Image (cartoon, rainbow, N blue to C red):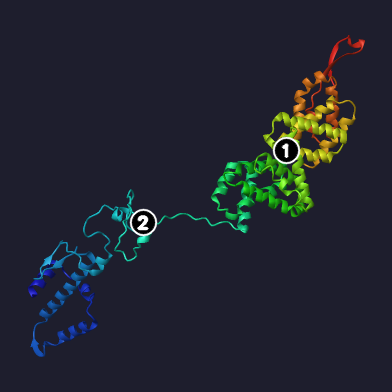
Amino acid sequence: MATDCEAWLNANPVEADDLSDSFVSGEEDNAGSVVNKNIKNEINGNWLTSSSNSIHEARLKAKAKRRLRKNSSRDSGRGDSLSDNGDVVRGTSVAPTSPKSKLLDRKSRLGKGRGLPKKGGAGGKGVWGRSGEVYELEEVDQKDPNYDEAQENCVYETVVPPLDERDFEKTVTPIVQEYFEHGDTNEVAELLAELNLGPMRSEVPSLAVSLALEAKASHRELTSRLLADLCGPVLSHSDMENSFDKLLQELPDLVLDTPGAPQLVGQFIARAVSDQILSKSYIDGYKGKVDCPYTRASLDRAAVLLKMSMGGLRIDNQWGTGGGQRPVIQLIKEMNLLLKEYILSGDSKEAERCLRDLEVPHFHHEFVYEAIVMVLESKGEKTLKMVLQLLRSLSASSVITVDQIRRGYERVYMDIAEINIDVPRAYFILEQYVDKSFSMGIIDVKLRDLCPCRGRKRFVSEGDGGVVKLESY
């Protein structure tokens, strides 16, 4: 043993300072000093005399083993080690023996894998399976304790609960109001078919008519078309009759919001009979059974319209065609009739109401154009003053926008050469009219300056040599 330690010390000399750095407690150093002083030592209760060299060698060997054990735990077997015989082994790689190093080692000990996802991407929380995998129908296990034989022949369907009175108005009212915007009856029929109307089916026509009473004439025309298209695919004839019966009963309440409700409901009834939604004997069934004056007035209005239809009146066009759906020629004729009626009556409020009923705000420039042409073709100052008053009132109430007025004046400026062929004084009258329009605040300075002026020839005095001068006024 001593010879092995000497051989190791010769290969790895140990300095005096390194000997002090050990895990031996201070008691060992004190014991060593005592041993140096006393030659006699006690081993297993027996006093022996030995040389100090053997004790010193044992201490060095124990310290060398501790150092090697410490280095092996740090370097994971990449240091020097001692064999069982005490021989020094250099540069040998020893597998790590520390349990702590095994726990912290995250590398695969099997040496397999290329860093791909675990289980091909089919593992982990919230994963439906690897991509491209198709699941087949699972066969029912009859031995399953939860197996129920009655469930094999079950057919599952979506059941829509029927609408009650409160949910009916909240659901159907937006559908009808949206229909007033797009005018597509097929879309309304599809939306109503998706609902389980149940006993509220007969309430659809009465709700649509009550909403149309407060709307425009074009919306009433759309409502009449909607009722004609819904009768058959969605609603039955009995549903229509029950709905109009309810309308006649609610006339006293409808008059509070719409004073002309009896006449309007009568027109809806006449249109329904004309479209074959209601039977021709529907009105005759109320004879002698009506006590309400509003109901009687509504039925009388319907009867009168039906009698007039026999004389050639078209009930299918009683509401008129709204807005941009009308032909341009028809709109121009109605605007000319409106202006002529205003010149005769002088009622600007009625003219404003009629212009609003046309529902063509994008076509108001035609109204301005026809009004100015009427002034140019008229005789006297009356028409000029009345047209200026009408345009000023319409501009102040924003019925006709500034852009539409500007477009109307510019159209007259462009066509003044052709108008002058029929009206020789057209340039002169137009200049007067534009100046007065500017003074009344109907147009601005820029539009006034665009007014064209016709050049005229005139001969000057003899001092000018009879030269013809071009001059504009």
> Measured from the top left, where is residue 211 in percent x and y?
69, 49
**Rendering quarter of residue 367:** top right
Please indicate whether residue 128 sits to the left or right of residue 93 in the image. Answer: right
Give the labeled residue for mark 2.
Answer: 127
Give the labeled residue for mark 1.
Answer: 318
Camera-side mark, 1 or 2: 1
User: From this viewpoint, is residue 271 visible?
Assistant: yes
Instruction: Give whichever of 108, 409 is nearer the camera.
Output: 409
> Measured from the top left, where is residue 396 in percent x and y?
80, 41
**Rendering quarter of residue 38:** bottom left
> Measured from the top left, where is residue 191 in percent x and y?
56, 47
Q: What is the C-alpha distance between the residues marked 1 and 2?
A: 66 Å
Query: How many numbered marks have been drawn onto this rendered protein structure?
Result: 2
Q: In the image, what residue type sits under mark 1?
A: Gln
Residue at x 28%, y 61% (from the top left corner): 106
| Quarter that holds the N terminus | bottom left
Compared to residue 356, the image places residue 23 above or below, namely below
Compared to residue 71, the image places residue 319 above or below, namely above
Label whose residue precedes the other's in the sequence (1 or 2): 2
Residue at x 78%, y 38% (from the top left corner): 354
**Rendering quarter of residue 155:** bottom left
Q: In the image, what residue type sits under mark 2?
A: Val
Instruction: Give whichever of 406, 278 is nearer the camera.
Output: 278
Instruction: Give whichever of 242, 143 is nearer the camera.
Output: 242
| Quarter that holds the C terminus | top right
SS of the residue at dot 1? loop
User: From this viewpoint, is residue 440 visible?
Assistant: no
SS of the residue at dot 2? loop
